[in-house]
Every structure is written in C-alpha cells, then in structure tokens.
Amino acid sequence: MSVLVSETECSSLFYNQIKNRIKLIAVKKQQETNLFSDFEPVSRKQWEEQIKKDLKGADYKEKLSWETLEGLTPLPFYRSDDLEKVKYSKSNTIHQKISSTWTECEPISGSKPSEANEQINKSIEGGVNAFQIRCDISYSDGAIGGNMIGTQLQSQHNFDELISGIDLTDKTLYFDSGMNTPALLAMLQNSDTEIRNAAFFFDPFTFTASHGREPLPTDQLNSIINQLSGDHDFKTLTADGLFYHTSGASIIQELGISLAIASEYLARSTKEKLTQTARSILFRLSAGPLYFPEIAKFRAVRILWANLLDAYGIDSSVPLPIHAETTPQNQTLSDPHNNLLRATTEAMSAVIGGVDSLLIQPHDSQFNRSNPFSSRISRNIHHIINEESHFGKVADPAAGSYYVEVLTDEIAEKSWEFFQMIEKQGGFMESLKNRVIQPKVADSKKRKLEAYATGKRTLVGTNNYPNSDEELPDVVISTDFTNALEVTDDSAEIDLSNLISSLSEAFKSDALVGDLFSSYFEPQKVLYTTLEPFRAGEIFESIRRRTEKEVEKNGKNTRVQLVPIGNIKWRKLRATFASNILGCAGFEIDSPIGYNSAEEAFNELKNSTSDLYVLCGADADYEEMTKSFCAKFSKHGLLILAGKPADSDLESKYRDYGIQHFIYSGMNIPKVLSAIQDQIFNSEKATS
C-alpha cells in the first residue's frame, strides 16, 4: 500500500524534527553545565600547594621539569591563563592550511635511471605521490672533473629515461641536487613530460657549512640565485635546516639558521624579483625525536616566515612550503626495527605540526641501499596515520593545547632572537666566516652526545635494553652511489647571464653534466670551519663491533657473570641495570636468581669460566660483602661493582679490595665499556 504525504505535511514533519533536535542539544548543554557546576574552579595556587604536598615540600618546577637539550624549559603543568602571556602563537599564520593533509614522499635510491624509474612506478602502485631523488655533484682538488652522487642523470637522455612513461601531472619530484640544480632544472624544462610540481634542494650556503668552501664567486652565485627564481612554480631555493639538525643543532638553532638562509636569498635578490624569490623558497627540516617540541617547531616556522616577509616588505600571503624528513640522527644499526617506531612518532609530530610534505626514512636506510620491504613499511606509516588514524582530517589539531601553544611561542621567540644574532653579524655567510654559528652548533652537539653517553637520552636497543643475541650488519652501505662525471670531446658555450636556457640548449645537443658543471660550480679557495653530521648510536655501535671482531678472531664471546647478593629488591635492580649496560657492548650475560652471601655465590659459580664478575646488591650491604666477594672471585676474572661509592675514600677502599670498575646511572657508558674491552681483549692477546 502506498502512502501519499502532502507538501504541507512534509514541511511540518521536517520542522518538528528540527525543533526536537534543538531541544536535545539544549538539554545536553544544560547537563554539561550542571556537570561542571558541581566542581569548584581550582586556582593555580591550589594546584601548586597540592603538588608541593605530594612532593613533600620539594620545588615542583625543579623536581618535575625535564632537560630538553633544546634550549626549552617546559613546565610540569599549564593552565588557560598561560595562554594570556603568549604573543607569537596568537598569529593566524599558523592556521593557513585548511587541513593537515601532506604530500607522501619516498626516497628513490636507484643508481641507474632505469632502476630509479622502476622504483618510482612501484611507489606509485603503493600509493605514493612524491619522490626524492639524489643527484648531486662533488669536486676534488687536483682531480680532473668531478663526481656525481646518487642517480646518474648525466645527460638529457638519462633524465628522460628517469621519468619515461610516468604520469607526473599530479605527482611531485624532489631533487636532492645541491649545486647540480641548474643542470637538472634545465633538463626538466627540456622534458616532453608535463611536470607541474618539482622542488630542488639547492642551498649554496649550507654547501659552505658542510664542505668549508663557497661554491662560486659571490657575483656569480647572486646571479644564479636570481635566475633560479624564474617565472615558474618550482621551488628552487632551499633552506636546509635538516643538515644543521644532523650536525647537532637544537630546535631553536635549526629554525634560526633556516630563517637566516632564507634571509640570505632575499638579501641577494634584485628588488624586482624579491617576491618571486620568496615564492621560490622551501624549508627542509628534520622531524626529530621530541614529540611535542617538534609539533611546536613546525607551527612556529610559519610565524617566523611571516615575520621575515614583513621585515622585507613582502606580502604575508606568500606561502612557505615545509618539507620534513624523519631524522637519521637517532637511527641505529643495532636492533634496527626500533627505527620503525622512532620514524612513526617523528612522522606524527610533523603531520600534526602542519608540514606540507614528509619523507619517512626506511628503518634500514643506514645499512641497506635499497630494500622493497623496508620501503613498503615506511610507505605504510604514511597510509596508516592518514587513512586509519585520520591525521589529515583536521587543520592544526594542536591548536588550543596550553602546552603546545606555549612551546610554539617560546620556540618562535627564541628562534627569532637566534636569527637576529646572525643578522647582526652581517647575515648567515658572515656569521659562518667569523665562526659564530659553528661553536654554538658544536656545543649543542656535545651536550646531546653526552646525554646519550650517560643514558640521559635513551636509544632503545643501543645504549639501553640491548638485544645481545643479534649481530650488527657486516657493512654499512652508502645510500648513494658515486660515479665519475662523464665528458665528451665537445665544449659548449654557456651564457652565464642566461644560464638555465643556455644549459637547456647544450643538453639538447647531447652535452653532458661533466662538460658543463664548471659554469655553475667553482669551489673557492677560502676555507671555512665545517659542521659534521653524526648519528647518536655510532659510538655504541663501534664498541659492539669491536666485540664482534674479537668473537670472530677467538671463536668465543666475552662472558659476564652477574653475582646478585643480599637484599632481593636491590640485587634485582642492580642486576637488570648491569645486564643492560654491559649488554650494550655485545657481551654474553649470565644472570642467576641470586644468593645470600658471597660464599654461597662462589660455591655455585666456582667452576664458571666467565671473564667479568659483577657484584649486584644494596649500597648498605656493599661495605660488608665487597671484601669477601673480591677475595673469592679476584683470581677468576675482572671484578665490577654495580653502584657508585658514596665518596672517594670508599671508592679507594673498594679498589684496594680488587674492584676494577664501577657501573652506575649517569656514568659515561662508552668510556667505561671501552676501558673494560681494553683490559679483557689485551689480556686475551697476552695469554694467546
């Protein structure tokens, strides 16, 4: 049976539904109001008094604050009134994006153009829409020609082979091309393939910071900067903050330096091209390990960019593309699957912070040049946080968080101050020349290395919680291939005032990069102090590799016998700590349940063939048990005490008994492990 409803009845029905819906919303709001009215507002003073009570009178700011090593001072808690103090993060420039969508970028590692082409096609099948291709050049003093690093795009034919058969209309190419950028831009403009989106990591100032020389005479460099800021939509001028991060820079230094490099481009631009130069700039930044500070960092960048544009009188609507990469600094060779977890949290902070594009390093990128499995897993991190966790659905999801808003403001303010310090020196290059930047970054690097060495910063599986059964990869494989630049017998005339067009014509005539690179790359003789990238786990991995070499040579591993005695709680804690520390060297650890006395322990372990014996117990019991422990075990191997003596007199007393090393929280782990290795391995040499 059909039922006919008149237009009037339908309108009435719809009206009643709306009216009922409004009533429900009003009831719900009233319930929420009643709920919160049941609780009295709590003032900051009340919070502080309660915290002080819980901490038994201790200063909560001192007790609960943490050392970021980034020049930041996060507080234990924040309230809404903290937002009244912020000035930078109230800016609307943070909220320019209408969603948190990002371009998913994948590194392409094929050395041959055909290999790289195949990788790009497979990545497209996996849902990736951007590709990062390294094709840089290097120059050696006294050598004829130079080298090409990465995918070998030495000719127009090579470039065409790279992108052959690929629809790039909705894809983005990121070229890690350095000083080879003019050549690749010329090749791209020659291509028959429609390429709408491309970016080039051209940063001549960072070249100087990393290689110690200016890449070109000043006038020629300024000319190239202005020519790269052409009438196109490509990003051709990069502020490579990632390099400074990997060299040890703090968050504040990374942003301050990136801003100074951007300012250097603008200062060298002609007045007519100032806005176009600004439109050509890209920031390449790290996605580092500190989750909330990194979110705040990416939010702060847009504030700083708006300030810089305002200082140069440029329209603030000029956008800043931010390309982020998960940091290689805390990637490890030991227990490398932990790199997956690190990359995931780093990617999350970058996306929440609002980056435009993101490259997630494969978890084995430090020792495996190309692995389809690891590439697929890193690709799926993008997909999971986007498709399953819906990170791309909300614009600036951190907005309103008291903690993140205050951090954003603090980072913006301090980064701007660091930038102004550089500008007062005459800009980035003058600061580099006068060695203003290098010692500041070096100091930050030193503090970070000390934090990892003492365990204040943890690398799971490397400086704590090691997997003693694994072996490090035999060879660390470079992520990029290097080949000599090829040359022809022909020489092309290059018009330096019209460089890109001139290079384009030369490549059409089958010229090679090796024939032409001297027109846009001529390292100068004046030397600068350089910055050196590092990985936090390198020193621990070198210690572990030393142990593995001894195992290969002698056919057996160094054995550690833990000797837990006395108080059950403390002997367990100390045994676990000792196992974690000594396991970082790759030693074999034997850990019994425990003993009541040194005599009982010796009776059980007297037939042990271990190389090290570690006393694990309570500080209060050590004075009594250390002497008997040493008397029993001193002829069996190296003796170690898990704990730190209360004073130097007690330490001397224990050493007189026979203790040779102390392991405790806050010690320099690599230094102690290396000293133990020296004694054990040299002893083995002497007896062999």
Image (cartoon, rainbow, N blue to C red):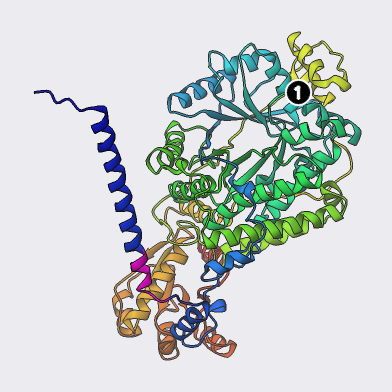
Numbered-mark total: 1
Residue 671, visible in the rendered structure: no
The secondary structure that most of the magenta stretch takes on is: helix
* Left or right: 187 as drawn, with respect to 613: right
Q: Which residues are magenta?
A: 33-40
Task: Judge the density around disc 1: few (<14), some (14-19), many (≥20) Cα neighbours within 10 Å.
Answer: few
Q: Position of residue 280 (x, y in %)?
A: 72, 32
Of the pair 141 and 295, the residue shown nearer to us: 295
- Residue positioned 91% across, 33% down in the render: 219
Q: Amino acid at mark 1?
A: Asp
Of the pair 595 and 64, the residue shown nearer to us: 64
Q: Is residue 648 above or below residue 403?
A: below
In which quadrant is the N terminus drawn? top left
Q: Position of residue 60 (x, y in %)?
A: 53, 79
- Which residue reaches farthest left? 1
Q: Which residue is mark 1?
A: 231
Determine which quarter of the picture holds residue 11.
top left
* Left or right: 663 as drawn, with respect to 501: left
Q: Secondary structure at mark 1?
A: loop
Residue 207, visible in the rendered structure: yes
- Residue positioned 85% across, 41% down in the render: 267
The reply to whether the magenta stretch includes residue 36 is: yes
- Which residue reaches farthest front? 8
- Which residue reaches farthest top? 509
Q: Is residue 172 above or below residue 687?
A: above
